[in-house]
Structure formats: structure tokens, C-alpha cells
Image: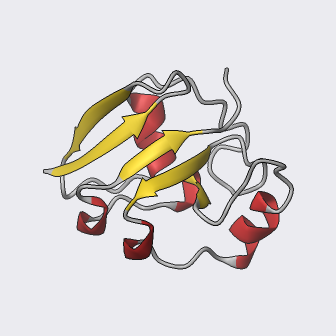
Amino acid sequence: MINITIEDRNGEQQPIEIPEEISLSLMEVLKASDYNILATCGGMALCATCHVQVLKGLEDLPEARNEEMDMLDTLPDAGFDSRLACQIRITENLNGMIFRIRGDEL
């Protein structure tokens, strides 16, 4: 199992266990886990409503692609540790990471 922690907009942290062989994005896992994120574009890196902040483990993620960086550049609260959850694939590298939800709510 891959274990990550999600911090919601209220600052409360909850662990999530994800099967290793799952082929989903972090955005899809968040929606399936009933987190209140808009994810308007459905994972195409076109809206930035699945914005997350990587609190722990940023160095273990692959570099953001140009499309993702372009969308993050449109956000006034994006920082060096900002990513789009739709662009983060669930892999074993995520084990132990902590993400804070920043994107728009439903």
C-alpha cells in the first residue's frame, strides 16, 4: 500500500492508503475519497482547480510539465511547492508524502 496524508482546507490531516497497482492521479484519488475539490477540467491541466501544496516529499515528484507550470502561473497563491493533483500519478514514490488541498471547492 502507498500511504499519503492529505491536509484539508481546515488544516486537518487524514491518512489515505492507496493500492500500489492503481492507475490513477492524485486528483482522482482525492475525489474518490470524498475531498471537496472542483477539478473542473477533469484532469487535463486546464483549470488549476485541483491545486495542491506539497508539504513533504516535493523532491520525490517528477518535474512539472510546461502545461502544468502555465496553469500554476495563473494562481495568485501558487508557490514553489504547488502542483496540480491531476498531473501527479500515483506511484510508490508518493509513499509518505503530505499534500494540502488548495484548489477550488465544489
Residue 31, placed above or below residue 83 = above
**Position in image of residue 77 (x %, y %):** 76, 48
Give me the residue at 35% from left, 58% from top. Answer: 90
Give me the residue at 48% from left, 25% from top. Answer: 35
Quadrant housing residue 103: top right
Q: How is the image coloured?
A: secondary structure
Give me the residue at 60% from left, 30% from top. Answer: 37
Q: Nearer the viewer, residue 68 or 77?
A: 77
In this rendering, the count of numbered labels is 0
**Position in image of residue 27 (x %, y %):** 51, 44
Residue 39, placed above or below residue 99 = above
Residue 64, placed above or below residue 1 = below
**Position in image of residue 13 (x %, y %):** 35, 30
Quadrant housing residue 68: bottom right
Q: Nearer the viewer, residue 101 or 46?
A: 101
The reply, left or right, for residue 62 in relation to residue 42 is left
**Position in image of residue 34 (x %, y %):** 43, 22
Q: Quadrant of the C terminus?
A: top right
Give me the residue at 24% from left, 55% from top. Answer: 96
